[in-house]
């Protein structure tokens, strides 16, 4: 009965093309909090959980542009409670398994078993469009403060981050939706990402490191721009000083993995520009540590000649005048990035001429 009730509400949410569609938010708004509360009572029933997430996703997708401020706030509050209840009962106990050797049909069926996660990601993406809509419209009664939008998005992201393991990110649709959300947040609100508790921040960073070598170009580019955005934000505001005081190898690990898993591999050519824009701020965070990492990697090369060629190539790439302007904006920042882009392309071609790549 509960599932049928939720599906009936879902049908109403999908009726956006009816005459006078503003009547639907007027009808649904008082029911949002009770509906989100069902997540707690039916947490063990994944069918009902998925129906609730699907209803909120569809409602946000179709009606966010026309909601009044009060209706938006009601949707944000109910969505936050919904995701909190969902996370409490599924993110800690659910085991994500992905069979590597399986047919395409089996992969599709397995991915569909995680439609609830997909709905949660899409809900956050649709809620985030409210910020964009309000920026592009004339000030009015329907506008919601940007901080109210970002707060609920980040709260929701924190709820589902524990689920986003490398196993779950093997599913193409889930992976694309996740990086659509994360890419948007990293590009628009990097300062808020940096203030996440370390366990959540580290989980997010690990997902970006996983994504940078992904076969899907959209996923890899989103990940690389996200990593570069984090490093650039830290250069500007030192926002990660608290995390670095306890875990001082955050950026060293990122730089090392970026070089080993992307720059020195054959996959670099379809993600050359974002890889360069990620490497530049990572190197600028601490040039001395970056140079030490390069020296360590060069020693892994068997030939002394190759070791010297690699060191010389890095010396030509990492120029002090370029490093000093990484955090610059405006015209000067653009010129600096273009200068490094050209140097990075030459560096990659030089390095790939003598390194064995996969």
Image: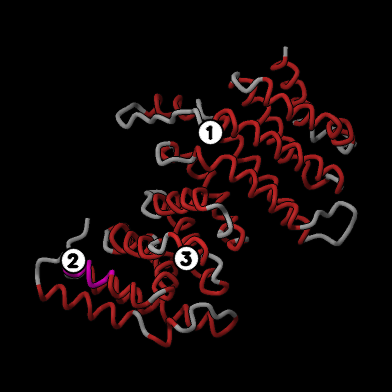
In this view, the mark in front (3 or 2):
3
Residue at the location (46% across, 64% down)?
Answer: 244
Q: Is residue 313 above or below residue 356?
A: below
Residue beneath disc 1 = 91
Q: Is residue 283 above or below residue 24?
A: below
Quick check: 285 left or right of 121? left
**What colouring does the structure picture have?**
secondary structure
Quick check: 174 left or right of 166? right
Decide which of tag 1 and tag 3 comes sooner along the chain.
Answer: 1
Q: What is the spatial separation of the Cα atoms under label 1 and label 3, in whole angstroms? A: 28 Å
How packed mark 1 is, by other alpha carbons closer than 10 Å (few <14, some 14-19, many 20 or more), is some
Quick check: 221 left or right of 57? left
Whether residue 222 is in magenta: the answer is: no
Residue at the location (10% across, 74% down)?
Answer: 304
* Of 159 and 100, the residue lying toward us: 159
Q: SS of the residue at dot 3? A: helix
How packed mark 2 is, by other alpha carbons closer than 10 Å (few <14, some 14-19, many 20 or more), is few
Residue beneath disc 3 = 228
Q: Which residues are magenta?
A: 293-299
Residue beneath disc 2 = 355
| Outermost residue, front side | 246
How packed mark 3 is, by other alpha carbons closer than 10 Å (few <14, some 14-19, many 20 or more), is many
In this view, the mark in front (1 or 2):
1
* Of 305 and 352, the residue lying toward us: 305
Whether residue 297 is in magenta: the answer is: yes
């Amino acid at each position: 009965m509960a599932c049928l009730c939720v599906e009936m509400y879902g049908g109403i949410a999908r009726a956006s093309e009816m005459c006078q569609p503003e009547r639907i938010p007027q009808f649904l708004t008082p029911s949002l909090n009770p509906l989100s509360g069902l997540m707690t009572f039916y947490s063990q029933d994944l069918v009902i959980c998925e129906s609730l997430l699907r209803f909120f996703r569809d409602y946000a997708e179709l009606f966010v542009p026309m909601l009044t401020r009060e209706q938006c706030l009601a949707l944000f509050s109910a969505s936050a409670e919904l995701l909190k209840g969902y996370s409490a009962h599924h993110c800690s106990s659910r085991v994500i398994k992905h069979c590597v050797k399986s047919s395409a049909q089996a992969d599709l069926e397995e991915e569909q078993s995680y439609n609830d996660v997909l709905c949660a990601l899409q809900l956050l993406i649709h809620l985030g469009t409210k910020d964009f809509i309000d920026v592009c419209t004339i000030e009015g009664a329907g506008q919601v403060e940007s901080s109210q939008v970002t707060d609920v998005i980040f709260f929701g992201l924190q709820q589902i981050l524990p689920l986003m393991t490398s196993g779950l990110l093997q599913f193409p649709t889930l992976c694309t939706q996740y990086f659509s959300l994360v890419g948007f947040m990293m590009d628009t609100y990097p300062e808020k990402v940096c203030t996440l508790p370390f366990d959540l921040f580290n989980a997010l960073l690990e997902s970006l490191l996983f994504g940078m070598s992904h076969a899907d170009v959209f996923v890899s580019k989103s990940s690389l721009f996200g990593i570069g955005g984090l490093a650039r934000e830290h250069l500007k505001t030192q926002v990660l000083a608290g995390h670095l005081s306890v875990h001082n190898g955050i950026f060293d690990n990122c730089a090392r993995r970026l070089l080993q898993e992307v720059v020195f591999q054959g996959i670099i050519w379809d993600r050359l520009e974002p890889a360069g824009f990620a490497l530049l701020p990572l190197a600028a965070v601490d040039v001395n540590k970056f140079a030490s990492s390069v020296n360590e990697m060069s020693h892994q090369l068997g030939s002394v000649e190759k070791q010297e060629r690699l060191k010389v190539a890095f010396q030509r790439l990492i120029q002090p005048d370029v490093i000093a302007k990484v955090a610059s904006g405006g015209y000067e920042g653009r010129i600096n990035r273009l200068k490094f882009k050209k140097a990075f392309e030459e560096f990659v071609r030089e390095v790939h001429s003598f390194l064995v790549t996969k």
